[in-house]
């Protein structure tokens, strides 16, 4: 879409490039299929209907973290046999939703959760298929708010609880353990944590084998990062390298299925946030570009000091200036970036904040009674 067309839309808005998404999905699928791996899409990254529909049509499964995400996946046509339901705090009502639809797997994160699922399944006369989410204590070397696989994190069942869990399993008549589930964190750009994950998964897999517990599938989670610094140079993540690491280091049993649940790497670079400059204001140390989008549209910079590449789409100036690019919300953390180099910027310019397809629109809030954003498609 040309800039002249873009600026016909009311700002701020999310812009999604569905053709680019399709290319990303095809690349991911192609590389997964080389090793017979299955991909589930982590809905939490983006639940836009057209994005979900495209992903469903490509035949991916769904990884959900709430009853509403399970219902959304069903509404968009994902088969219940492709739906995994994770999360440390599933409510009884949410568990019922999964049971009613006979989903592929509840990814369970504590012994008490398994007890509760067993109880509810018994009342429903069902057997719930579960995967045990194990905490592998592997450092993902990413931002601390998006690290999930360390013992200090709330996620997963810890290794030292396993003996006691296995002793209790025969009491859970309405539970069938079908898989092991892992997820060490998000926005992981080095392959070393994934290699370390494989080593731990092999140990767990052997542990279960030694105890004659047949594990049908291994779910390695998501976490593959995207290049936020140079979104235009390397827009599609290196899926070949990523799946190659698992192919090299993971030692599955024959017939064990291998699943991944990718979010950011599939949708991150298909979206951007387009915003208009309301004011340019001279500060003491820096000049501020004040946008009509704020942390209510994109909270990642405020929450994780995340970097998103920022570009002025409409300035024709040949001089470059440094600005702090901020939003209109009444919080000092409502800042998209400090000392950002932009072409000289003025009121009315259009600004593109790149790589906002994942954890952008879904994390929007109504704080300051902000309106919901419209969406535009390429
Ligand atoms: N599986 C599980 C169990 C997860 O918790 C997550 C993400 C994923 C899969 C997908 O991970 P991905 O492939 O997208 O890295 N709001 C944060 C990210 C939170 C990620 C939460 N879990 C952000 O904006 O960076």
Image (cartoon, helix red, strand yellow):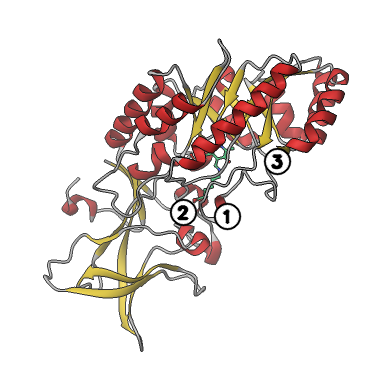
- Of 12 and 137, the residue lying toward us: 137
Give the left or right position of residue 374, taking residue 346 as reference.
right
The reply to whether residue 275 is in sight is yes
Q: Would you call the spot at circle 1 few (<14 residues within 10 Å), some (14-19), or many (20 or more)? A: few
Point out which mark residue 145 bears. Answer: 1
Establish whether ligand 1 lies closer than 8 Å to the Cβ of label 3: no
Residue at label 2? 372
Give the image location of residue 364, x and y in percent.
Answer: 50, 54
Query: Assess mark 1: CB under 8 A from ligand 1?
Result: yes
Residue 172 as seen in the image, left or right of residue 340: right
Q: Residue at x 53, y 41 (%)?
A: 44
Task: Judge the density around disc 3: few (<14), some (14-19), many (≥20) Cα neighbours within 10 Å.
Answer: some
Q: Nearer the viewer, mark 1 or mark 3?
A: 1
Which residue is found at the position 49% from the left and 64% from the top?
302
Circle 1 sits in a helix, a strand or a loop, which is it? helix
Quarter of the figure with the C terminus: top left
Asked if residue 346 can be seen in this view, the reply is no
Considering the image in quadrants, where does the N terminus appear? Answer: top left
Q: Position of residue 274 (x, y in %)?
A: 32, 56
In depth, the one of 29 and 124 nearer the eye is 29
Q: How many marks?
A: 3
Provide the residue designation for mark 3: 88
Q: Where 171 falls versus 200 (above or below)?
A: above
Which mark lies nearer to you, 2 or 3?
A: 3
* Furthest residue toward bottom: 284
Q: Are marks 2 and 1 in contact (CB under 8 Å)?
A: no
At label 2, counting other C-alpha atoms closer than 10 Å, the crowd grade (few under 14, some 14-19, many 20 or more) is some
Residue at position x 46%, y 45% in the image: 188
In what element is the residue under mark 2?
A: loop
């Amino acid at each position: 879409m040309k800039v002249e067309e873009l600026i016909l839309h009311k700002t701020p808005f999310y812009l999604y490039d569905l053709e680019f998404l399709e290319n990303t999905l095809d690349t991911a699928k192609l590389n997964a299929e080389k090793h017979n791996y299955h991909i589930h899409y982590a809905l939490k990254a983006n639940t836009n209907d057209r994005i979900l529909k495209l992903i469903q049509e490509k035949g991916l499964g769904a990884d959900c973290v709430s009853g509403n995400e399970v219902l959304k996946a069903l509404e968009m046509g994902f088969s219940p046999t492709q739906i995994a339901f994770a999360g440390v705090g599933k409510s009884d009502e949410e568990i019922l939703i999964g049971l009613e639809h006979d989903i592929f797997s509840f990814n369970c994160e504590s012994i008490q959760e398994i007890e509760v699922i067993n109880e509810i399944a018994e009342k429903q006369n069902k057997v719930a298929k579960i995967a045990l989410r194990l905490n592998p204590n592997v450092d993902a070397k990413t931002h601390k708010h998006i690290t999930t696989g360390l013992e200090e994190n709330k996620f997963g069942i810890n290794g030292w609880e396993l003996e006691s869990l296995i002793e209790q399993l025969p009491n859970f008549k309405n539970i069938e353990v079908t898989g092991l589930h892992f997820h060490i964190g998000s926005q992981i750009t080095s392959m070393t944590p994934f290699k370390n994950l494989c080593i731990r998964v092999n140990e767990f897999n052997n542990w279960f084998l030694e105890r004659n517990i047949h594990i049908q599938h291994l779910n390695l989670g998501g976490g593959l990062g995207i290049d936020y610094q140079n979104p235009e140079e390397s827009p599609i993540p290196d899926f070949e390298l990523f799946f190659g690491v698992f192919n090299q280091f993971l030692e599955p049993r024959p017939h064990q299925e291998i699943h991944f649940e990718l979010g950011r790497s599939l949708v991150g670079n298909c979206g951007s946030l387009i915003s208009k400059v309301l004011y340019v204001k001279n500060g003491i140390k820096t000049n501020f570009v004040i946008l009509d989008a704020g942390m209510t549209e994109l909270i990642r910079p405020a929450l994780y000091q995340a970097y998103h590449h920022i570009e002025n789409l409409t300035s024709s100036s040949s001089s470059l200036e440094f600005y702090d690019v901020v939003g209109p919300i009444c919080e000092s953390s409502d800042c998209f970036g400090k000392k950002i180099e932009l072409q000289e910027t003025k009121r009315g310019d259009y600004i593109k904040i790149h790589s906002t397809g994942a954890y952008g629109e879904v994390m929007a809030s109504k704080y300051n009674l902000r309106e919901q954003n419209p969406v535009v498609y390429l």
